[in-house]
Image (cartoon, rainbow, N blue to C red):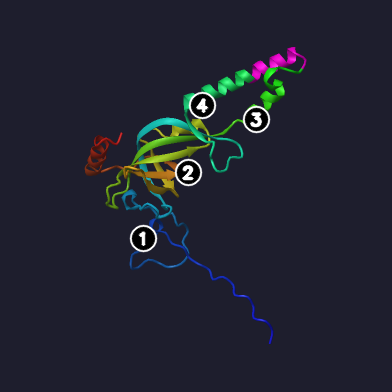
Amino acid sequence: GGLDAPALPLPALKLSANGVRRASWDAKLGKTASCGFRVALGSLLEGGGQAPCVHVRVERRYGLRVYERPEGDAAGRGAGWLTAAGHESKLQEQAEALSWRREQASLDGGEAGGGGAGGAEEEWAARPRASWVLNLRVSDLSGGGGGVDRVCLATVWLDAPGQADEFAEGAAFKVVGARLRRGAGGEAELVARSASWARMKTAEPVSAAAAARVRRALRRGHL
């Protein structure tokens, strides 16, 4: 007979703890229209993968920060953090230096100290790539899930600084694809660099007991 056909890899189904929940006994099996079912913030585990969907309210909004990474620096060795004001000041200084070098180059017939206008143009083009990052403290709008993480930090990566205006205190969001991690002090944080945040038109009503839990968590120094 001929040679045996090479064995093909078997399909694998990978499940993560944060994306799996016990179904009711009468649940219909098979393909569903959406896998983004809602889970409680307090039920998420660090290292448990992405959360299908959580509903949160913004309790505190902190200052906008800027993450700068040089072009081509995939490992992020030359990356650094700046405040939004510091980033704007740095851009202003670079723009003024570029303008001054252009003027000097035009006066000197195309040459100026420090590389002339051409060198300044190259420096401006090679400036670090900036990502805008907003830090929040959010509370869970879910009625269940238990756990202690009813209030936690959240890190949101923005495409432009103007997007931060959407995250006003009191606004409610549906977050899909976030992960949970814990800092050095054990505090939970939603990491949402690749997650989607959809503003909800109205926040769901919160019971008096749930509101009291949020206030107690905020008074414990989580500000």
Residue at mark 1 to residue at mark 2: CA–CA distance? 24 Å
Viewer-proximal residue, 32 or 193? 193
Count numbered badges in the picture: 4
Above or below: residue 54 compared with residue 76: below
Q: Tell me where the magenta segment starts and ends, as one range.
A: 98-109
Image location of residue 65, percent across then percent down:
46, 31
Q: In the rendered structure, which amino acid carries the disc numbered 4?
A: His
- Lower position in the chain sequence, tag 1 or tag 2: 1
Foreground mark, 1 or 4?
4
**C-alpha separation, residue under disc 4 versus residue under disc 3:** 16 Å
Q: Which residue is mark 3?
A: 125
Circle 4 sits on which residue?
Answer: 87
Residue 91: x and y in percent read: 56, 24
Q: Alpha-carbon distance for marks 4 and 2?
A: 20 Å
Q: CA distance from mark 1 to mark 4?
A: 43 Å
* Residue pointed to by mark 2: 193
Mark 3 or mark 1, whichever is nearer to me: 3
> Of the residues shown, which amino acid type is indicated by label 3?
Ala
